[in-house]
Image: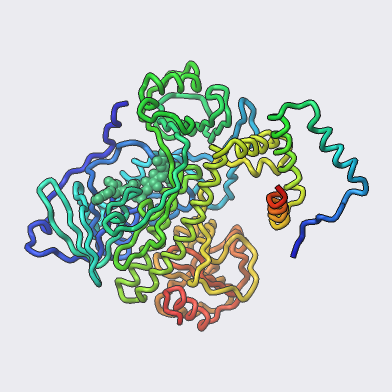
Amino acid sequence: MTMLKTEPSFPNPDAAYEMLVEGHRGVSEAESAALNARLVLILSNHIGDLAVLKEAITLAKKAG
Amino acid sequence: MAERKSVYQFGYRRSADQDSKSPVRRPVVIVGAGPVGLTAAIDLAQRGIASIILDDADRIGEGSRAICFSKRSLEIMDRLGVGERLVEKGVTWKVGKVFLGEHQVYLFDLLPEAGHKMPAFINLQQYYLEGYLVERAAELPLIDLRWRNRVSAVERHEDFVRLTIETPEGEYKLDTDWCLACDGARSKVRDCLGLKFERHTFEERFLIADVKMSADYPTERWFWFDPPFHSGQSALLHRQPDNVWRIDLQLGPDANPEEEKKPERVLPRLKRMLGERQFELEWVSVYRFNCARLKKFVHGRVIFAGDSAHQVSPFGARGANSGIQDAENLVWKLALVINAEAPESLLESYDLERGQAADENIGHSTRSTDFIAPRTKQERVLRNAVLQLAPHAPFARGMVNSGRLSVASEYDSPLSTGDEEVFAGSAKLGLPVPDAPLEDREGRHRFLLQALGADFELLYVKNGARPNVPEGIRLTVIGEDLFDREGLFMQRFGATPGSAFLLRPDHHLCARMRRYDGNRIRNALARAKGLAK
Ligand SMILES: Cc1cc2nc3c(=O)[nH]c(=O)nc-3n(C[C@H](O)[C@H](O)[C@H](O)COP(=O)(O)OP(=O)(O)OC[C@H]3O[C@@H](n4cnc5c(N)ncnc54)[C@H](O)[C@@H]3O)c2cc1C
């Protein structure tokens, strides 16, 4: 049973994407990678569910 | 760096066994007088079983290794008669701080619960522990400790093991019903049996130094990621007795171990850390850490315990602490088997329970080592992200891993009888029972663990007459033999009047019930002795 939501959650997906992009504007590649790492940790904790996290990792790997 | 002088020196003595024409047969021979072999011998002797300990050295003192001893180890040591001495000599600590650069990112306080005899942790040089154990062993006539006896060959037979032993006066052979291989990470016995010990070696090298200085640092564990005095790496500072301080400095994977041990390399590194303080180098070494375990610890009449059975990196202080628990888990079972009170198959539960513990310890120490020394660039990015978030977000503090300190393992064991009722409290099936402050009939203060016997024990909370317990169980009635004035026993055990708790000889809880039921107790006892079908 899949628990990871992959259906659209944001009524305005463009705004969400833009926000992420904005976060990375004007920073170096290393800073950007570090920012992503912090974001992943913050969002993982917010999800707080190992099964969902695992599905997310699997999906991310599969898509790459 | 000069070798550390020996702290304890012992002499080789010829044994009559060396003059025998054919090998003498003994019930138990223990190979290795490290913390694990000594623990096993003393525990066996206290259970009336004689053993011989063979050790290839004749001194204790070369190098310093373990410094952190856990509450569970201290409780076991207390039963063996050296616990109070260890605590008295050791440095009791409870606060750990983690720094990123110069800034503290995390603090833990082991906040020991009141009403336990033993503290959460002490720091003490391993040679003191070994020295005290050797002295305790010398008080017990059932222990024959033979220095400069090196085991060089092991022959396995159906119901005994034949050892070839080298001494300064030549070789002799000894037969034994049971051989406990407590001969450390480079176990000769393991090699002789041709057993695989597949290691995962961590690339990173660490400089470990013991430094003597009178410093004003508090008695806390300080761990730095990327400290100003040792850029890009990690460092640890922790106090030991005698004004000795343990310092670990991460060196990176490419460090040259021989070069790094030279005083001209070590001293400047330490000066950067310690500043103007005067210090003396007691001992220094460069390590690369391994994790490994034997697939099985019991091989017929040869049984492995401690580092010979499993090895961990030192982050979390799980080496000696887990080995001591191996010995205690094994010994009561072996004693029952030797005395024909339990089937040999009981020893499989040693394999199972301590195998679970080994996996848990390897898991913890691997995760700690990977956090301290990330294996790839990306891992490092993620690790640094945790450290950067730690001051800002509580969740990240929980992820900071500079070593998860050793606590007793909870056995998911066939020796336990499943609960039929619900119990609150910190006591749990498969865990050692928690301590509690009690009073005896004379009104004297007694800790629960001090009052427990060496055999199976039933703790019964008074509710009418004393129950008639089955043979082989010692009965203690709370409210008659011991009194729970502070109510902490009741709370920690989730007990109510009439509750009964069955403890194994290693004080792990193996059955409990709200009402004493002789049949259930009898069955639980049989199960815990490996007699259940
Ligand atoms: C830097 C460092 C820090 C550590 N810190 C901690 C810590 O804080 N807490 C902790 O719990 N653990 C720690 N450890 C681990 C701990 O030191 C070991 O787990 C512990 O010593 C294992 O005990 P043992 O009795 O199994 O083996 P050992 O202590 O290795 O003893 C084995 C004995 O067998 C003898 N022997 C070997 N071969 C033969 C032979 N063929 N014949 C006869 N005798 C033989 C040896 O002389 C030795 O006396 C640390 C280790 C290191 C390296």
Residue at x 43% of width, y 41% of height: B289
The quarter of the rendered structure image containing the C terminus of chain B is bottom left
Q: Which of B421 and B380 is in front in this view?
A: B380
Quarter where residue B453 is shown: bottom left
Quarter where residue B265 is shown: top left
Residue closest to the far bottom: B519
Q: Position of residue B207 (x, y in %)?
A: 43, 31
Residue at x 64% of width, y 31% of height: B104
The quarter of the rendered structure image containing the N terminus of chain B is top left
Residue closest to the far top: B276
Q: Nearer the viewer, residue A36 or B306?
A: A36
Viewer can see residue B141:
no
Q: Nearer the viewer, residue B463 or B342?
A: B342
Q: Position of residue B136 (x, y in %)?
A: 30, 51
Residue at x 29% of width, y 30% of height: B3
Number of callouts = 0
Viewer can see residue B12:
yes
Residue at x 26% of width, y 53% of height: B139
Residue closest to the far front: A64
Depicted B530 relative to depicted B297: above or below: below
Would you say B191 lies left or right of B291 here?
A: left
Q: Position of residue B235 (x, y in %)?
A: 52, 31
Would you say B48 lies left or right of B348 here?
A: left
Quarter where residue B157 is shown: bottom left
Q: Position of residue B444 (x, y in %)?
A: 48, 57
Would you say B303 lies left or right of B438 here?
A: left
Depicted B274 relative to depicted B154: above or below: above
Q: How is the image coloured?
A: rainbow
